[in-house]
Image: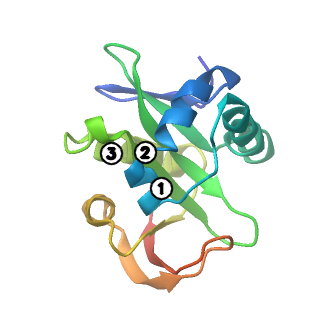
Amino acid sequence: MSSLDIMTERLHIRPFTSDDTDFVLKSCNEPAFIENIGDKNIRNKQDALAYLDGGPIKSYLDNGFGLMLVTLKSSKQAIGCCGLIKRDNVPNIDLGYSLLKDFHGVGYASEATTAVLAYAKQTLKLSKVVAYTSFTNQPSIAVLEKLGFVCNGEFDLPGYDSSSKYFELNL
């Protein structure tokens, strides 16, 4: 088990590895992912591996944190991702998460994000985390508000065509 591993009552949140390409390929091509997060142009296992190597795995090496795989403890089934993101040309660290559609609405997003925020505060000693979401992603907005995030307008993330809702949380 890695020092980045996080356990909750129902979930195991762990660093991605190169063995997780099938999950990345599936999750990044779900309609809700493309609509709310964006099309990452991951069309095959090679694209998924390049995404992992240049994204989450690179972030673990560069920052000591990154997006991680969320699995069910009971079955080890991969259901989503959750973690902290340090974007180039953006000053704050943000919370990112997504779940496969079949796992929406049963509290997994709140459980995973709560655990990652506790890690951010206790282990990384962060005092603030931000989050971005599309204006129409009501389920994600509800999760952020439940966690105590406050909407502070909108933000133009580099690489995105439209503005995102911008949230802040003091830890």
Of the 4 image quadrants, the one containing the N terminus is: top right
Q: How crowded is mark 1: few (under 14 residues within 10 Å), some or many (20 or more)?
A: some
User: Which residue in the structure is indicated by mark 1?
Assistant: 34
Q: Where is residue 71 in the image (x, y as percent from the top left)?
A: 42, 25
Q: Which residue lies furthest to the front in this view?
A: 43
Q: Which mark is residue 7?
A: none
- Give amino acid for label 1: Ile
- 75 or 147: which is nearer to us? 75
Which residue lies at the image location 73% right of the left edge and 31% below the top edge?
46
Q: Residues within 10 Å of mark 2 (few under 14, many from 20)?
A: some
User: Which residue in the structure is indicated by mark 2?
Assistant: 30
CA–CA distance between discs 3 and 2?
17 Å
Q: Do the residues labelled 2 and 1 touch (CB within 8 Å)?
A: yes
Q: How many marks?
A: 3
The way the protein has been coloured in the rendering is rainbow
> Disc 1 on helix, strand or loop?
helix
- Give amino acid for label 3: Ala
Q: Position of residue 63 (x, y in %)?
A: 74, 48
> Disc 2 on helix, strand or loop?
loop
Which residue lies at the image location 34% right of the left edge and 13% below the top edge?
75
User: Which residue in the structure is indicated by mark 3?
Assistant: 109
CA–CA distance between discs 3 and 1?
18 Å
Q: Residues within 10 Å of mark 3 (few under 14, many from 20)?
A: many
CA–CA distance between discs 2 and 1?
6 Å
Of the 4 image quadrants, the one containing the C terminus is: bottom left
Among the 4 quarters of the image, the one containing residue 57:
top right
- Earlier in the chain: of badge 3 and badge 2, it is 2
Among the 4 quarters of the image, the one containing residue 4:
top right
